[in-house]
Structure formats: structure tokens, C-alpha cells
Image (spheres, rainbow, N blue to C red):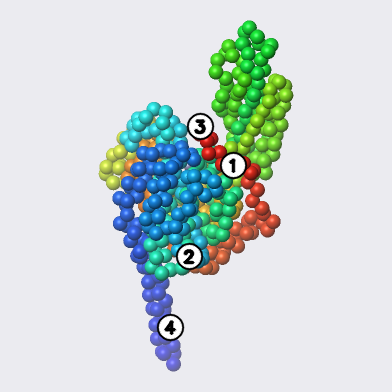
């Protein structure tokens, strides 16, 4: 009897082992992974095309069109122009739950034009460029979404939704998409951003609001009739003075920065129009909301004291990120499985030349792209940044990761990132991202318990009485904010 039991136990153990082995094999060898393995050149071409378009926020017609038509040709249903934004879109594949969302961005930065060479060389002086790697961000998420769709198409239940999100750089596209309910009903959202190494983002970052203040005065000859003039630039200066005084009396960790975007045209003409653009940031959006109210009062005071009038608007507003550890853990596991990026000899020579051109002697930094940091590793640069992804994290459970796509020779929004992101170094990162997203989605589709845990944590962290009140209010998307 004992022997029979032993044999039964041994057989059961073998069955379990082979089942887990088979499950493991299926995850790593199926239509989704096969698609990623054979698609390097497809996405190499795609990311380089968007790199060359380098379109600014809300003007990404060619970039969004290219990604949307690629998704459509892979069987996705595409709705273009969502949330009143022509370059925002939602692409859906599959049916039923769970619904997994992926975020894509594709806007460039002004003045960042750069050729894909190892030294600083603008393609066109002053023109936009992909200094933040959003050519890769959009392409990586799209590659992940198509890989997921290939697996779903084998007869698995679930839905994948790719969100085409414009104008992350200052235009806050996702704030408007969140306000219009685009992300409602999504069970889990996966997000990533290009970087110099690989890690899951556990930082809340900073909530922020971008405010434009425009003062109107009375123009006159600055020398022959100064008494008739009321200077709008005076109002900007008085306002800035008060804001600089305010720095002493704000909660710790607050950031206040501004640029004067219109200060008049000539010293001998009293300016009848002047404009200043502010960013107000803090870890808490409640503090940001308070800073905004105080800034408005200061602007009104400045207008009153200078005999001018003021108009203001919140151009964009972003929540701090709501963390979801249950989802972050699944991402971390898969990021570790996929690993980092290894350069081939040609890419290594390019990277070394770029280091030299950047005045960096320590070649050991080139190991960073191959590393995956542990969950919760300190990564100071993520503490001080704001993103419109923050808004999304409060309307659907979201987890974000960073993937190595750049030569570590710069510090963000730099020529080194623009350049290396437009080469195969960037594409290698993109294909890793596609794998991480596919494996994570695979795990969620195959584990209703994990999805339930992710959603329960989201509800608990957000609180029962949470209502999404956008920092942008009810204003229309600022489609012309770059003009
Ligand atoms: Zn970015």
C-alpha cells in the first residue's frame, strides 16, 4: 500500500513538473513571442520614420497616422481623434475581459534636432527632435500590442487597447483623455519610458500645473509719452517678484519655474502685451492646486498695481503617480526575464565615440543598458519629474517601467538621447519593451487572481470616495500651445 502511494505521489509530481514546464514553454514560445522575434526590422523602420518626422505636441499627424495604420493593418479597430484631439487615438483588438491597456506617445521636443551620429550635429538648426525618445515610446508599445494581439488571435479571451497619447511634453494629452473617460473600464495599464537602464518606476514623481499668464497694458512712446503707457512687462516683472517672494512660504519640495515668453518688442515702445509661462510642482496635487490659486491672486495684484489686466489659463495639469505594487511586481519579474540591451561591436564603437564627444572618460557607464535594477532601487532622476501618465494612474491601475534605449552619455532631453534613440540601439530597447509588455499581459490574461489583486489594491490606495477632478478644469485641449 505504501509503495502504491509512493508511486502515485511520484506520478503526480512528474505531472505537476511537466505542466509547469509546459506552461513555461507556452509563455516563451507562442504566436506573440514568434511575432516579436521576426519583427525587428519592421519596428526599426517604424521608429526611425517617427524619429525623422519629429512632430511637436498636438501636431503629430504623420506619427499618429503611421502607428494607427500599422495597428489597423494588424487587425485592430482604430478610433482616431478621441477626446477632441485629432492626433489622439484608441486601437482595440480582441473581446471580453481582462482589458489590458498600453500607452503610446510620439511627440518631439522643440529645438532638439539631431542627426543619428556620435557627435552633436543638428539636422536642421532649431528644428524639433526626439530628445525624450517618444519615437521609441510609441513604437515599443505598439509592438507590444501587436504581439499580444497575435496571441489573442489564437483563440484566447481578452482585449488589448493601445492608447495613442499626444503632446506629453507640456500639452498634457492624457489629462484630456482621462477627463473624457478614454481609460475607464481598463483592468490594467502598462506604460514605459525610454532611459539608459532598465527598472520599474516606483516613484510618485511630482504633480504639476502649467499656467500661462498674459497681461494687457497700453502702448505708447517710451520716451515722448511714457505717462500715457501702461506696461504689460511691468506687470510680468511685478508678478514674478511676488512669486519669487512666495518661494520662502511654500511646502517643502515645491518647484516654481518660469520663462517670459513675450516681453515686448522694443525698449522704446511701452509693451501692451506680455506673457509669462509657469510650472508649479509638488508631490501632492492638493498643494499644486493651492499654489495655483495663490499665483492667480499674485497675478491679479500685479495687474492692479500696474494699471493692466490679466488673463490666465492652465495649459496642462498632471496628478502625481498612484503606485500599484501588485502590477509593478509582475512587470519586474518580466523585466528581469527579458533583461537589458547588449551592444554589438558596431554599436559599441558608436557608443564609445559618443562618450568621447561628451567628455566622459569612464567607459564602465556603458554597462548600464544591460542592467535591470531591483524593484524599489533608488533612481533620483524620477523623483523630480512630472508626467501626464500621473492622471491615468488615478483612473485605472497602472504600472510603468523604464527601458534602456539610449547611450548613457547625457542627462535627458539631450542630443545624445536624440541621436542614439534613432539607431538600432533604440530599436533593441523597443523589442525588449515589446517582450516585457507581452509577457506581462500574458501573465494577467492567465491569472484572474492577479488582476483581482491589482484592482483591489487600486481601489484601496485611491480611496472609496475618490472623484477624478482634473487640474485643467473644463478647458478645451490646447491644440495650438506650440504655436
Ligand atoms: Zn518623455
**Relative to 62, does residue 397 appear above or below in the rendering?**
below
**Residue located 67% across and 28% down the image:** 310
Which residue is most to the top? 224
Q: What is the quadrant of residue 114 in the picture?
A: top left
- The disc, 2 or 1, on the residue closer to the chain's N-terminal end is 2
Distance Cα–Cα, label 3 vs label 1: 16 Å
Between disc 2 and disc 1, the foreground one is 1
Mark whose residue sits in front, 4 or 2: 2
Question: Where 98 sits versus 428, above or below?
Answer: below
Please provide percent x and percent y for residue 318. 59, 43
Q: Are marks 4 and 2 in contact (CB under 8 Å)?
A: no
Q: Residue at x 51, y 61 (%)?
A: 99
Between 481 and 111, the one nearer to me in the picture: 481
Of label 4 and label 2, which has the lower sequence position? Answer: 4
Answer whether labels 1 and 4 touch (C-beta < 8 Å). Answer: no
Residue in the foreground of this view, choosing between 92 and 118: 92
Of the numbered discs 3 and 4, the one sitting upstream in the chain is 4
Mark 2 C-beta to ligand 1 under 8 Å: no
Mark carried by residue 483: 3
Spatial CA span between label 3 and label 4? 72 Å
SS of the residue under disc 2: strand
Amino acid at each position: 500500500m505504501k509503495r502504491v502511494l509512493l508511486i502515485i505521489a511520484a506520478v503526480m509530481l512528474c505531472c505537476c513538473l511537466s505542466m509547469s514546464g509546459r506552461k513555461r514553454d507556452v509563455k516563451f514560445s507562442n504566436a506573440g513571442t514568434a511575432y516579436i522575434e521576426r519583427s525587428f526590422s519592421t519596428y526599426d523602420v517604424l521608429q526611425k520614420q517617427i524619429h525623422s518626422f519629429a512632430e511637436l505636441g498636438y501636431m503629430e499627424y504623420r506619427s499618429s497616422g503611421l502607428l494607427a495604420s500599422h495597428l489597423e493593418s494588424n487587425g485592430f479597430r482604430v478610433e482616431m481623434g478621441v477626446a477632441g484631439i485629432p492626433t489622439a487615438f484608441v486601437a482595440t483588438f480582441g473581446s471580453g475581459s481582462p482589458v489590458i491597456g498600453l500607452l503610446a506617445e510620439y511627440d518631439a521636443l522643440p529645438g532638439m534636432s539631431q542627426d543619428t551620429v556620435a557627435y552633436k550635429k543638428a539636422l536642421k538648426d532649431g528644428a524639433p527632435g526626439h530628445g525624450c525618445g517618444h519615437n521609441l515610446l510609441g513604437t515599443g508599445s505598439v509592438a507590444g500590442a501587436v504581439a499580444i494581439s497575435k496571441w489573442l488571435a489564437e483563440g484566447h479571451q481578452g482585449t488589448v487597447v493601445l492608447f495613442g497619447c499626444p503632446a506629453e511634453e507640456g500639452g498634457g494629452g492624457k489629462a484630456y483623455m482621462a477627463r473624457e473617460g478614454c481609460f475607464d473600464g481598463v483592468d490594467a495599464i502598462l506604460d514605459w519610458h525610454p532611459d539608459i537602464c532598465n527598472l520599474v518606476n516606483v516613484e510618485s514623481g511630482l504633480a504639476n500645473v502649467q499656467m500661462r499668464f498674459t497681461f494687457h497694458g497700453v502702448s505708447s512712446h517710451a520716451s515722448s509719452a511714457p505717462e500715457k503707457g501702461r506696461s504689460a512687462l511691468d506687470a510680468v516683472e511685478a508678478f514674478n517678484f511676488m512669486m519669487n517672494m512666495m518661494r520662502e512660504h511654500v511646502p517643502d519640495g515645491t518647484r516654481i519655474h518660469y520663462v517670459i515668453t513675450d516681453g515686448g518688442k522694443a525698449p522704446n515702445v511701452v509693451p501692451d502685451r506680455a506673457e509669462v509661462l509657469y510650472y508649479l510642482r509638488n508631490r501632492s496635487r492638493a498643494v499644486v492646486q493651492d499654489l495655483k490659486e495663490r499665483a492667480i491672486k499674485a497675478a491679479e495684484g500685479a495687474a492692479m498695481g500696474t494699471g493692466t489686466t490679466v488673463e490666465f489659463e492652465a495649459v496642462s495639469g498632471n496628478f502625481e503617480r498612484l503606485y500599484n505594487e501588485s502590477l509593478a511586481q509582475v512587470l519586474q519579474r518580466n523585466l528581469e526575464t527579458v533583461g537589458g540591451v547588449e551592444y554589438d561591436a558596431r554599436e559599441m564603437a558608436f557608443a564609445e565615440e559618443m562618450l568621447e564627444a561628451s567628455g566622459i572618460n569612464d567607459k564602465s557607464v556603458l554597462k548600464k543598458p544591460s542592467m535591470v535594477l531591483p524593484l524599489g532601487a533608488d533612481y533620483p532622476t524620477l523623483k523630480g519629474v512630472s508626467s501626464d501618465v500621473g492622471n491615468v494612474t488615478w483612473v485605472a491601475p497602472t504600472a510603468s517601467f523604464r527601458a534602456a534605449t539610449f547611450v548613457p552619455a547625457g542627462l535627458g532631453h539631450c542630443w545624445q538621447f536624440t541621436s542614439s534613440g534613432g539607431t538600432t540601439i533604440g530599436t533593441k530597447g523597443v523589442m525588449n519593451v515589446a517582450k516585457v509588455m507581452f509577457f506581462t499581459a500574458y501573465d494577467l490574461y492567465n491569472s484572474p487572481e492577479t488582476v483581482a489583486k491589482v484592482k483591489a489594491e487600486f481601489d484601496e490606495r485611491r480611496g472609496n470616495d475618490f472623484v477624478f477632478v482634473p487640474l485643467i478644469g473644463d478647458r478645451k485641449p490646447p491644440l495650438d500651445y506650440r504655436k
